[in-house]
Image: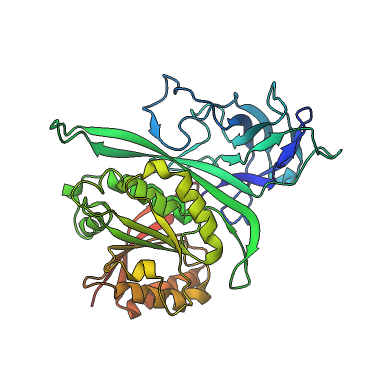
Amino acid sequence: MFFYISFLRPPPTQSSPSTPIHITPQISNDLRTEPYTDSQDIYYSWAPYPQPAHPPPPSLPPQPTSPTQYLKTTRPIKLTTYRPSSLFKEIPVPPPLGVRENQQWQLILSATPSKTPNYIIDLGESNVGHGIPFPVISMPVVFSAKGVSKGGGGKKQERVERIYRFSNGRAGGEESGNTEVVMDFCDLKITEQTSFDLDKNDQFREQKIWDSGIGLSSWLAEFKASDQNRLGEPLDILWDGLFSSEARHIIELGAGTGIVSLTLASLRNSLSHLNSPTPDKVIATDLESAVPLLNHNISSNHSLYPTNTPQADILDWDEEELPESVTSLGSIDVILMSDVTYNTDSFPALLSTTSKLLRIGDKPPVILLGYKERHEAERSLWSMMESIGVRLEKIGQRRGFADPPVEIWFGRVFR
């Protein structure tokens, strides 16, 4: 599991340049149901929005391919020491030094002042999230005295951002015969919706990052960097579905913010154009209420996959018909799933949808599942999968900060 810094009381959308903003930071699990039980220093910094054009500091690694590049930020300063006993403590944050009327700045909260840059979540680390909560970035705060009430704050923000980094090794230019691996660093910016919406099952939910999405994305980044010639079965089969230089059709169920689909599309960007005249089709699906945020995250990271942009579509597991964008593919190579087991009542609908996807094309797709156990009853999915001819086997995991880990499972049709 992972721990996240977030806002119990978020920053306002607007604040006076001459007064502090007030926030309540928290550190908890992905569902915000388990507070962090130790003490932890929290540091704050400000990043101007939009970012000014500037080169990366010479001490940093090669320039990343990203919508963010390297954020120009103020020096991190200790804000508070988080303790469970002061969970609801309201804390003033000074505005950026020298802020001017109508400027916009984003607030960054992190658990360390020394890591460079300290707002990055490094998915390339196999021990991602070990020993440190993830940082968070607010949406822009408009610093303007116009229209601000005497209380000093405007409407509270309802979204946050996090930035995830991973390397995308690619071969050098074919024309020159250069086969040297060039390391591109991808910075993926994911926006989360932190206000609660009522979903179709009359349950309140947030469109935010869940542990399995991070664990599976991190595993994908490591898997792509592995030596495919040394992969035995079934990893060689999975590699072909995920990272072949031929065009691939990949569907994600319950995509949420889209982090898994967007990570995979970014990793495939250096591959998809090599041996195929047709582009990839990576389709991130979820309920209708999730699609606007999915589209936002896809467009925010367009520079990571200019040749194979993913698409978002509505796929309600309770509906009889699959969307036309899926049925028109003719074949599917991989079905992605992460954190699809939180509601066991949805399992029959999930299996029905999976069964339909398995029948598209002459060759059934393989399944890649990221799973973190929240209740032992969720494990019933494994036997239910066998009832539709799918066998799952564990191929990896990401432990994160503590148990339970995010488990990585491979599935394929066995009959």
**Vertical placement of residue 132 versus 249, above or below:** above
**Vertical placement of residue 396 versus 59, above or below:** below
Q: Where is residue 20 shown, x and y percent of the image? A: 76, 32
The residue furthest left is 177
Disc count in the image? 0
Residue pictured at 45% horizontal, 69% vertical: 315
Q: How is the image coloured?
A: rainbow
* Residue 219 seen in this snapshot: no
Q: Where is residue 140 shown, x and y percent of the image? A: 63, 38
The residue furthest right is 150
Residue pictured at 42% horizontal, 77% vertical: 321
* Residue 240 seen in this snapshot: yes
**Vertical placement of residue 102 versus 379, above or below:** above
Q: Where is residue 1 shown, x and y percent of the image? A: 50, 52
Direction from residue 78 to residue 127 in the image, left or right: left
Direction from residue 264 to residue 7 in the image, left or right: right
**Vertical placement of residue 197 versus 23, above or below:** below
- Residue 226 or 405: which is nearer the viewer? 226
Q: Quadrant of residue 409?
A: bottom left
- Residue 70 or 392: which is nearer the viewer? 70
- Residue 108 or 189: which is nearer the viewer? 189
Q: Quadrant of residue 304?
A: top left
Residue pictured at 26% horizontal, 70% vertical: 364
Viewport quadrant of the C terminus: bottom left
Q: Where is residue 93 shown, x and y percent of the image? A: 72, 32
